[in-house]
Amino acid sequence: MVQVQDARPSLTVAEITQLVAQHFPQLGPPGKRIVIESAGPGTARVRMRASEDMLRPGGTVSGPAMFTLADVAIYIAILGVRGASALEAVTSNLSISFLTRPEPRDLVAHVRLLKTGKRLAFGEVEIYSDGKAEMVAHATATYAMPQA
């Protein structure tokens, strides 16, 4: 049973994109590396554009790149539900399983929040190589929510 506090997203994709660009410049300009494709009631779809610096020897996407995508994507879903009040949410745990070697192409994360409470938010993310049906990684994360 999903326990997302508010079924309606409180921010649009454009608003979330603006917040992320303003508060996380290390992710680069909006749309260059990370693209928020959708944000809905407790969900998000986030793309990480392929680039040479995310590849490891052997021509596959590196684990740290997939970990980053999972972490950012779940954070984006939380912002979509909670709005700017969740900017200070922090990752308290993230576990990722790498299931197969992704091809050197864009990665797409599908996020589902399972619970957003006063103190914690918990979600899962499935990561796919763009255009492929086989999941390349699966992650779960818990975020500590800022106290009012």
Image (cartoon, rainbow, N blue to C red):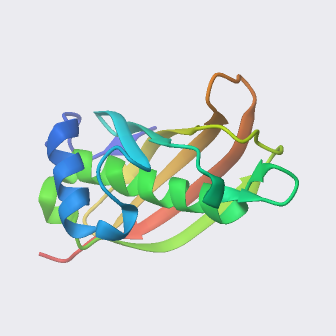
Residue 121 visible in the picture: yes
Who's the residue at 79% across and 49% down the image?
60
Who's the residue at 54% across and 61% down the image?
68
How many numbered marks does the figure carry? 0
In the rendered view, would you say 32 is above or below 25?
above
Whether residue 109 sits left or right of residue 132 in the image: it is left
In the rendered view, would you say 30 is above or below 40?
below
x, y percent for residue 23: 22, 68
Q: Residue furthest front?
A: 52
Whether residue 18 sits left or right of residue 104 in the image: it is left
x, y percent for residue 81: 23, 46
x, y percent for residue 80: 24, 45
Who's the residue at 11% across and 75% down the image?
148
The answer to which image quadrant residue 35 occupies is top left
Residue 5 visible in the picture: no
Task: Pick the residue in front: 84 or 4.
Answer: 84
Task: Pick the residue in front: 131 or 145.
Answer: 131
Whether residue 115 sits left or right of residue 103 in the image: it is left
x, y percent for residue 109: 53, 40
Whether residue 44 sits left or right of residue 58 in the image: it is left
The answer to which image quadrant residue 38 occupies is top left
